[in-house]
Amino acid sequence: MQTVNIHEAKTHLSRLVDEAAKGNVFIIAKAGKPMVKVLPLSGEEPDTTKKLGFMLGEIAVPDDFDSLGTKEITDLFEGKSS
């Protein structure tokens, strides 16, 4: 993704907007700090937030999950080596 400083963006705004409309997203930075992202209205980026339950049906959690490794953990706390 291209990053342009604010001065360059003002100088080449028309060209940059045309590029963004074609799907070439870019960032405008001020003093090296990213300020805004320019992207086409029709091609908004998909929502990338993580959702609870996104792997539903793809993994199985054993019924004894809460107690897995209990003996080993207890032994470690008591200073016993396995």
Image (cartoon, rainbow, N blue to C red):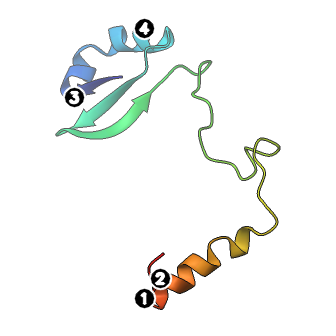
Instruction: Classify mark 2: helix, strand or loop.
Output: helix
Judge left or right: residue 80 versus residue 59: left
Q: Does dot 1 land on a helix, a strand or a loop?
A: loop
Mark linked to residue 69:
none
Name the residue tied to disc 4: 18
Q: What residue type is labelled 2?
A: Leu
Q: Nearer the viewer, residue 35 or 82?
A: 82
State left or right for residue 58 relative to residue 34. right
Q: How far apart are marks 4 and 3 (CA)?
A: 17 Å
Q: Which residue is drawn at 78% across and 51% down?
A: 60
The amino acid type found where label 3 is placed reads: Asn
Query: Which mark is first along the chain, 3 or 4?
Result: 3
Q: What residue type is labelled 1?
A: Gly
Which residue: 19% across, 38% down?
32
The CA distance from mark 1 to mark 2 is: 5 Å
For label 2, the residue is 76
Q: Name the residue under label 1.
A: 79
Within 10 Å of the Cα at label 1, are there few (<14), some (14-19), or many (20+) other Cα atoms? few
**Which of disc 1 and disc 4 is earlier in sequence?**
4
Q: Quadrant of residue 17?
A: top left
